[in-house]
Structures are given as C-alpha cells and as structure tokens.
Image (cartoon, coloured by chain):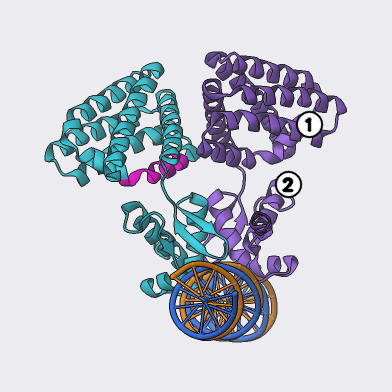
Chain colours: A cyan, B purple, C orange, D blue
Amino acid sequence: MKDMLQENMDEYLPLRDVVFKTLRQGILTGELKPGERLMEIHLANRLGVSRTPIREAIRKLELEGLVIMIPRRGAEVAQITEKNLQDVLEVRRALDVFAAKLACQRMTEEQKKELKEAADAFEKAIETKDATVSARADVRFHDIILEAAGNDRLTQLVNNLAEQVYRYRFESVKDERSHSRLIEEHRRIYDSIVKRDEKAAEEAVGTHVDNQEKAIKDQLRAMKQ
Amino acid sequence: MKDMLQENMDEYLPLRDVVFKTLRQGILTGELKPGERLMEIHLANRLGVSRTPIREAIRKLELEGLVIMIPRRGAEVAQITEKNLQDVLEVRRALDVFAAKLACQRMTEEQKKELKEAADAFEKAIETKDATVSARADVRFHDIILEAAGNDRLTQLVNNLAEQVYRYRFESVKDERSHSRLIEEHRRIYDSIVKRDEKAAEEAVGTHVDNQEKAIKDQLRAMKQ
DNA sequence: AATTATTATAATGTATACAAAGTACAAGTT
DNA sequence: AACTTGTACTTTGTATACATTATAATAATT
C-alpha cells in the first residue's frame, strides 16, 4: 500500500524537467537547429507554461553544453564544430573502452546472459531493417556493458556524451552496408567480455567506436554540402 | 576602444552565476554540509538577492551532482557515499591517464617549457610548506597537461570530477610525509611526457592518482570517527 | 547616399505574488 | 499512551511584474 503510493509519486515531474526533456529532445533530433535562439517568451507560449520553468530548463541545458549563453542576449542552440565533435568522440572512446575493461572484471553471470540476449536481439533487429528497432537494440547492448561496469558516474558521463552525438549515430545504423560489420563487432565485444579478456575487449570496443566515429564524420561532411 | 568595452563586458556576471559559484564554493569547502537543506528564501536573504537567481543556480548544481533534488521539498547538499567517491575517482583516474597519453602526442615545445616551470614551481611551493600555495602549484601543473591534451571536453570533465573530490585533496597536500613522494611523482610524469613515452606517462599518472586516492580514502575514514 | 541619432520594441535579468504541497505541532479520539 | 485529525506555518512550484539592456527601424545630419 505504501509502496503503491511511493510508485505513483514518481509520476509527478516539475514543469522545468518536462521542459528540459522537451528542449533537449528538440535539440538532439535537430528540430531546434544549431545557432537558433531560444527565446523564453516564445518557448513559454509554445509550451503553454510561464518563463520560469523555461529559464530553469535552459540553465541545465547550459551546463550540459547543449546551449550556450550570451549575456543579456539569451540562449542559443550550441553549434557543433568539427573540433567540438572530435573532442566529444575522443573522450567517449576512452570512456567506452574503460567501461569494457571494468565490465570484464565485474560482469556477473546473470549479466552475461543478458548481454547474450541483447546481442542476439540486435542481430534479429538488424535483419528487420527497421532503423529505430536496431538503434534501440544497439543501445540496450551497450547499456548492459555499462551496467556491468558498475560505475554510476561513468554511466552518466557516457550517456551524456553519447547524447551529444545522438543525431548522427542514428543515421549510421541505417546504413545497410555497415550491418554485417556491426554484427561482427558486437560479437567480438561480447566474446571478449564473457572471456574476461580485458585487452581484447578494449580493442574490440575501440575499433567499434572508431568505426562509428568514421561514419559520423562522413555524415557530417555529407551534410555540409 | 571597442576592445576595452569588450573586456569590461566580461566583468558583468548574472547574479545566478555569482550565486552558483558561491554555493559551489560553499559545498566544496564544506561550509555547506552534506545533507544540509538549501532553502531558497534563507539563501536569498543571506546573499541579498531574490529567489530567482538562487533557483537557477540550484538547477546547475543539480546537474553537476553537487545537490540532489527532492520533489516539492527542495534541494540538499549531496551526500558523498563511499561508492559514489569510488566511482568518481575511478573515472577521474581513467581520464587523467588518457589526458597524459594525449599530452604525449600533442604537447608543444612551448608547453614543455611551461610544464618544466610548473614542476619547478611546485617543488619550491612544497618547500614553503604553505598548503594553499602548494595546492595551487599542483593544480597549475595538471592544468598544463590538460591544456596540452588539447581536448576541451576532456578538460571540462576532469575539472568537474576533480571538483567533486576537492574538499579532500587539499588535505592530502598538507600532509608533509607525502611531500617527497609527490615531488618524485611529478618528476616522473614530467619526464615521461617530455619524452613522449605514452606508456610511462600513463603509468606515472596512474600511480599518482592511485596514491591521491589512497590519501583521500584515509582522510574519509578518519573523518568518520 | 551613408552614417549617426532617436525612439519604439522586444528580450533578458531580477523581484515579487500566489497557489499547492509538505511539515510540525496541538487537540481530540480510541 | 498511541493514533488520528485539524490547523497554522513553511516551502516549493509557477506565474507575473518591473527594470535594464539589446535590437531594429526610422528620422536626422553630414
């Protein structure tokens, strides 16, 4: 009874958090374009709230690096420069590799089973050629590794960094030419982690992220023209 | 003339940022203790501002992980659990090691000179036995390595993580028994980076952070009693 | 015609107001 | 004595108001 109450409590979300999620989604999906100004009154009207929750959401986006503040002019969606993207990808690679290493040391038998299921589900998802389904399965696979790494801060940082390049990654899963490569890479990652072979896992994740990086950069170059 | 104006423009800081820095400082120095509630009206009165800048500052602290929000109850200073500290230190170690590796690849001759100066300054600072001066010199040394790594996102993350353990690190520099060890470690880091010996640099930074970690944990255990 | 002033408009920065939820404590009930 | 119930009070969540600064468009001047 008390538990049920506790559960339903979770449903309450302050407007600032709703706005935060909405704006972040908008930025990541590209609905809000880099350089676009985020004007409080406009957003408030559009979302049907007052300026206060908007402002508080923007403060969080600011710290996350998704918007930049110009004093007395307001917020605008952060530009993704090539250097910036490079920096994010570089750090993400390091952290993903580190997560794989930790996962080798800490993964439980239960998690091994989950990882196997996720790997299988990913291969099936790829076959459906539904990019959304594949992307979700891909996320699930990596989430299990992160969970196995057992470091909440690491999880938070990797997820945040992944978010910053989200708009591009989706496209990379779409590209059918890379499907067999993706499956192969996941298999190598799975095998090495299950064997607790740290060096192999680090290497497998490293090349996996490298390839993703290449795909993203191709994408970016294509977009520029 | 325009430049001067530009410069003076920088002096303007929105109250929210002043409050943000003030509160963060308060948390990191321990003036605001873990578990302590941050009540908006009290803080507003104490700092002589309205609730609005306070709230916006809290939103940023929330995302930084320095305060936690309890819905409809407000913010309180985040507890540092042992697990949490462990997680932060673990990630910080990985990123610091990574920064050293990048620094080996990218450090310019100019930066090498700066690093030498910083290393010398650190040794002199240690001799003065003034903990504040030593700590500052220590920060300077590590900042140069980060700068040489040439990755802004990495710099941001490392600084943020360092901040989370700041309240303990200060104490570790104070402990005179560790002085010779610190000097020795800095020398090894300096030497390996200048030689662009990635493996050695990674190892040197690794043990440096490990030792720091031990010191912090001793500190924490001592505080508990 | 180009450039500077002027002025109206709109946006941010900050403070305040008000409603809803949470807290604590006293009074009443079993 | 333990447990509700009620009530005053505090605090957050949200909206709005006001002041200051930026923006843009028009008029005035060279």
Left or right of A215? Residue B138 is right
Is residue A139 visible in the rendered structure shown here?
no
Q: Is C26 situated above or below A65?
A: below
Q: Nearer the viewer, residue A122 or A212?
A: A212
The kind of residue on which mark 1 rests is: Ser
First along the sequence among labels 1 and 2:
2
Residue corresponding to mark 1: B134
Amino acid of disc 2: Thr
- Residue C21 lies, with reference to residue B22, above or below; the image says below
D16 to B111, vertically: above or below: below
Pinpoint residue A52: horizontal percent, then vertical percent. 51, 71
Q: Secondary structure at mark 1?
A: helix
Q: Quickly name the residue at label 2.
A: B29
Among the 4 quarters of the image, the one containing residue B112? top right
x 73%, y 22%: residue: B182
Q: Chain of mark 1?
A: B
Q: Chain of mark 2?
A: B
Whether residue B147 can be seen here: yes
Residue located farthest toward the right when viewing the structure as drawn: B128
Read off the magenta span: A156-167
| Image quarter (top left, top right, bottom left or bottom right) of the N terminus of chain A | bottom left
Q: Residues within 10 Å of mark 1 (few under 14, many from 20)?
A: many
- Mark 1 or 2: in front is 1
